[in-house]
Image (tube, rainbow, N blue to C red):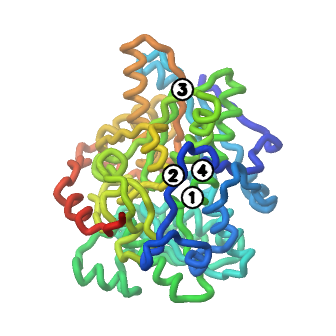
């Protein structure tokens, strides 16, 4: 039988953890897109509430979670930690495999860990409407739920290929009261420009961000909200790893390997950052692996440089691993991982040698996900399946070496609204995409030149 490790509500984290406080070298700052000088609070104020801007820049190790946010967290937090003995047996590995399951949230993923505080801080500042982008729809649905809780309006620009592939994510967004538009659209100047260049564009997160930022920047009552990449988002997600540390202690183990899928970086940061902090402060030798799609491999194939977060070049410049801000990835089913860049904090951790990165094709990921579903019962989200593919690889290494290592991974969400992707895999119609080296090189050639 699978073993569950629960925490009582009184053991839920009351602070978010800031890995920036422990980095052995400072994180490069965001730059103003016009002056190329470090962006200050006033530069970000048109888009974000000051509380989040301060979290973006704070050197403090811990950030207190407001009581109102803690109360909402208790709808699903603390989330359970499971051991996966049936999968271990199927893999014929001596490894012990544990997973933190974030699919128990109302939205079915880890995303409400940051959507709730973001809506809360905007409401506190008197903002009545938010705009955002979403890839596969997990972020859009999580933010629509949070906005409904705080009585706010929300406009979501959803990447067009995911809008078509995942209709029930759209339904969730509508059910929670938000408006959702496929991107690129004809509702913004940025969207019209993208469509003029390519009327059949399937969209990208970079395009959807441009549209959402444009609406926020041109309406005083509206702010922009981002579900990944930025520092404050990384902080909010660390409740995952903090809980996992306590649950692993309850289980009498400490992970030798920590694994999370990575697109913009939020769920990977959530599970890994507390363990990276322990690695820095306490000399822990944990291997920490970020896993991305081979079709959009920013960490394994991108360059570490300043780049825009969006195609329309409206956002501040971020120092990150990037494939180029106007690179449009193939329409893989892991829509939440189709982003051209990686969170600056995750990118910095890779540069410092604190983490590793791997990339897998989607057939390998779905193979691992189906095996996991048939042994442990949970159908993983396509994004999470990338972490499972890495676990299979790590478990095989343990089998070859005979080492009974402890592996911890983040199962960041369920795949109940992604069954069309599973249908494609099971029928043999799921296509793998090769790394588009030429397209990436073209996009990288158009990146800003920053010394």
Which sits in the foreground, 49 or 60? 60
Element on which disc 2 rests: helix
* Residue linked to disc 3: 285
* Residue linked to disc 4: 20
* Residue linked to disc 1: 231
Marks 3 and 4, how far apart at CA = 19 Å
Marks 4 and 1, how far apart at CA = 9 Å
Query: Is 271 rendered above or below residue 399?
Result: below
Where in the figure is residue 342, as x and y percent of width and height? 42, 55
* Residue linked to disc 2: 345
Where in the figure is residue 322, as x and y percent of width and height? 35, 57
The disc, 4 or 1, on the residue closer to the chain's N-terminal end is 4
The disc, 2 or 3, on the residue closer to the chain's N-terminal end is 3
The disc, 2 or 1, on the residue closer to the chain's N-terminal end is 1
Marks 4 & 2, CB-CB < 8 Å contact: yes
* Residue 411 visible in rendering: yes
Element on which disc 1 rests: helix
Judged from this view, the residue extending furthest toward the top is 402
Marks 4 and 2, how far apart at CA = 8 Å
Residue at the image position 51 percent from the left and 46 percent from the top: 268
């Amino acid at each position: 039988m699978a073993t569950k490790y629960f925490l009582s509500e009184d053991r839920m984290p009351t602070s978010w953890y800031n890995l920036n406080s422990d980095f052995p070298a400072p994180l490069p700052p965001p730059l103003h897109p016009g002056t190329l000088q470090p962006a200050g609070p006033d530069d970000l104020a048109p888009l974000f509430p000051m509380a989040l801007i301060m979290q973006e820049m704070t050197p403090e190790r811990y950030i207190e979670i407001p009581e109102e946010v803690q109360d909402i967290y208790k709808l699903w937090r603390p989330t359970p930690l499971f051991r996966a003995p049936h999968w271990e047996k199927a893999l014929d590995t001596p490894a012990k495999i544990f997973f933190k399951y974030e699919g128990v949230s109302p939205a079915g993923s880890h995303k409400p860990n940051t959507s709730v505080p973001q809506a809360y801080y905007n409401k506190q500042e008197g903002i009545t409407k938010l705009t955002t982008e979403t890839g596969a729809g997990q972020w859009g649905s999580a933010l629509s739920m949070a906005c409904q809780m705080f009585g706010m309006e929300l406009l979501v620009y959803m990447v067009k290929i995911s809008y078509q592939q995942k209709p029930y994510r759209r339904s969730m967004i509508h059910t929670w009261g938000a408006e959702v538009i496929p991107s690129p659209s004809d509702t913004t100047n940025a969207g019209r420009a993208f469509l003029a260049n390519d009327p059949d564009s399937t969209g990208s997160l970079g395009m959807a961000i441009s549209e959402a930022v444009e609406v926020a920047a041109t309406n005083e009552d509206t702010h922009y909200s981002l579900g990944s990449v930025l520092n404050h988002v990384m902080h909010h997600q660390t409740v995952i790893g903090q809980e996992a540390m306590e649950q692993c202690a309850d289980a009498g183990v400490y992970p030798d390997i920590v694994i999370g899928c990575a697109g913009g970086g939020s769920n990977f940061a959530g599970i890994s950052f507390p363990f990276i902090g322990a690695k820095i402060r306490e000399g822990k030798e944990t291997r920490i692996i970020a896993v991305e799609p081979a079709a959009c491999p920013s960490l394994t194939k991108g360059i570490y440089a300043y780049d825009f977060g969006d195609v329309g070049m409206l956002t501040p410049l971020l120092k990150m691993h990037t494939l180029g801000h106007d690179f449009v990835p193939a329409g893989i089913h892991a829509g939440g991982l189709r982003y051209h860049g990686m969170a600056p904090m995750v990118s910095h951790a890779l540069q410092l040698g604190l983490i590793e990165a791997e990339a897998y094709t989607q057939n390998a990921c779905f193979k691992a996900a189906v095996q996991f579903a048939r042994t442990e019962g949970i159908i993983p989200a396509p994004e999470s399946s990338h972490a499972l593919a890495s676990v299979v690889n790590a478990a095989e290494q343990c089998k070859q070496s005979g080492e009974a290592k402890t592996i911890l991974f983040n199962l960041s969400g369920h795949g109940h609204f992604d069954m069309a992707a599973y249908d494609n895999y099971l029928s043999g119609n799921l296509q793998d995409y090769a790394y588009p080296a030429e397209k990436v090189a073209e996009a990288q050639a158009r990146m800003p030149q920053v010394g």
